[in-house]
Amino acid sequence: MHGVPPDFVAPWLRLPLSSPTPVAAAVREQRLVWVGNQEDMVRRYPRVAAALPYRFSLAAAPIAGEHRGWGALQLLWPADHPPHASRRDCENAAAGARRVARVLDAAGGPPDFPERPWIVPDELVRPHPEQDGRAAVAYAERLPEGALALDLHGRITFLSSTAARLLGRPADRLLGAVPWSALPWLDDPAHEERYRTAVISREPTAFTALRPPDHWLDFQLFPDAGGISVRISPSGRSAAAAPATAVPGSAQTAPTAPSAGRLQQLMHLAAALTEAVGVSDVVDMVADQILPVFGADALVLSAADAGRLKIIGHRGYSAEVLERLDGLPLDTDLTPAGRALADGTPSFFARPEEIARSYPEAPRISGKKAWAVLPLIVSARPVGVCVLSYTRPHAFTADERAVLTSLAGLIAQALDRARLFDAKNDLAHGLQSALLPRTLPRIDGLDFAARYLPAGRGQDIGGDFYDLIRLDDRTAAAVIGDVQGHNVAAAALMGQVRTAVHAHAAAGAAPDQVLARTNRLLVDLEPDLLVSCLYAHLDLTRRQVTLASAGHPPPLLRRPGGRAHVLDLEPGPLLGIEVAAGYPLTTLPLPEGTLLVLYTDGLVEVPGTDADSVTAALTDHLSRHTADHLADLRADQASDRAGGVLDRLIDELVQVGWPAGQHTDDIALLLLQATRRAG
């Protein structure tokens, strides 16, 4: 990285590909992402906007290698850049990403990722001509104002004697220091925020601060890619004329306020935690985004359950240590977790000796050197405990304690919501699984594979279903359908439809009659939900299939040695609408090697993409690749591996339909392959 201090990117050192950030979107969608200004960022990526409320433009270009995606290249422009990307901007970003991809491809494997990003020295990016540094110092000393230089980390790299005099501190005590840390009266989040604005937006900015007891100073900041030049001069303002927002700092009060950077990190983490859905999301969010920000090395997240602390997430601990800590009673004296949860007060231990005074076994169990024990409490109700630990002694500043204490409340609420979601989700999907067939019957002369994929997280259960019914030794019925909605009512109706279809098929009804009788049942039930269904009667003796459709997407068909195409079926109306509805029949030959792909609309209805285009891509994939699958099937026909070939084909079809994953609707697939009869 270059041109940005490391603490600015601390919340994004590790990101899941699903995160709502420009760089993750570029990798997911394999396209250039451009964010023109702050308004654009707020609209599209509000979490990032909360953490970086500055004026700048951004481009994220995917680093696409020859055989794999490596990541993304992110470029920032200052505030004076136009909000619309020029052709040159896009070409430069894409060209840079391609160059990085070629280097990574040539390396032959993934690089070793450092714990912290590598900082590209300014000299490698912007070579400066050789000049006499003494002349520059002499120039600064002749100025009537104070001159001071900051690097991108906020450290003082140069100051004139006038600047040292105005700041009231010798130069040797300020060089290498951060102003708001070295000078208590500058430790105001508003002042640090001016510095951060200058670094990101690359716009000059200014502020006025009071050096006790009554010296008002004007600070003017002039940034570029290498750092910030600061001009300091007396403002002539009196204390009585101080603005209402100016609060003189003091050594006793200033350190208690979290820095601007910490406040923005807290806003970012709060936004991130609101998006966590399940318990695993909360654990990943804490591990990937909170640990790096505070420099911690390990994590244990425990939930209060039946009087014990059950570990539900962890990082950086061995299995032996976790086994020792899991299931401790809430009143345990082995670690401070129980006491912290009982009195609701966070505990901070900077070194092993501190924790050993009250809990002598704790440092020996974990082998860590410092701990932050955060009780997780919601509405006076204990939820759990979050323990951050360090492999080296760590003195917790007042800033860190304040932010971690605030974060504990946010983690508690996120964890409480996540546990409720997981409980509801487990119940819903348990019901879904109970309504779908546990196993499908083996039928001589027919190979098959089936898959049900629920919608992305945050959705309730859906009504997609499939079934394969053995009618006799040489005939079978295949059915797939979709009940409108994602709720318990949809799942319950799905169970009724599947049961009705199964019963009518087993009774020997023809395909059109199976749908007609099921339709009359639904009309009587008046469910107020739409149901589509496709029924296929497979006669493996005559080598033919007869199909009837109730408003369902037509299946895909591939003949041996031919191209795949969409079957042209005349559909009847959806089930449950018209009591006297008829369902036309279509009969087709089913020679050995014929492949039928039955699916629900969740496979092809991709937001922002035409369903016909997705269907065309699926048929093209079947045409180009199914020949190899069929060869594998013929080779494996006598084994149990044939179903595995079709299972892999299902994976490929889902990938074609949803290349970025995260499908937003349920998907059901049933693949049927006519094979040679055994014996």
Image (spheres, rainbow, N blue to C red):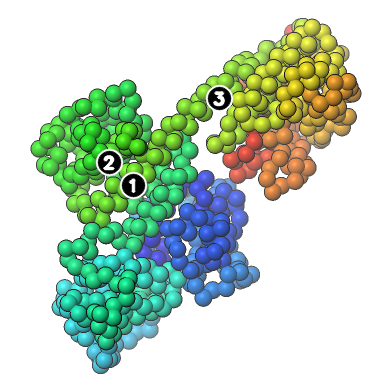
On screen, residue 423 versus residue 299, left or right, reads: right
* Residue plotted at (25% across, 80% down): 240
Using a 10 Å C-alpha cutoff, classify the residue at mark 2 as few (fewer than 14 neighbours), some (14 to 19) or many (20 or more): many
Left or right, 74 with reference to 634: left
Q: CA distance from mark 2 to mark 1?
A: 9 Å
Above or below, comparing residue 316 to residue 79 in the picture? above
Front tag of 1 and 3: 1
In the picture, the disc for residue 94 is none
Proximity of marks 2 and 1: CB atoms separated by less than 8 Å: yes
Q: Label 3, on which residue?
A: 429
Whichever of labels 2 and 3 marks the residue nearer the N terminus, that label is 2
Q: What is the x, y in percent for residue 107?
A: 47, 53
Q: What is the three-letter code of the residue carrying label 3? A: His
Classify 10 Å Cα crowding around label 3: few (below 14), some (14-19), many (20 and above). some
Looking at the image, which residue is at 55% across and 25% down? 428
User: Residue at position x 41%, y 78% from top?
Assistant: 204
Residue 62 falls in image quadrant: bottom right
Q: Residue 373 lies in what quarter of the image? A: top left
Name the side, left or right, on which 3 lies relative to 82.
left
What's the amino acid at mark 1? Answer: Leu
Where disc 2 sits, the SS reads strand
Residue 39 visible, this angle: yes
- Where residue 673 sits in the image (x, y, percent)? 74, 22
Q: Earlier in the sequence, mark 1 or mark 3?
A: 1
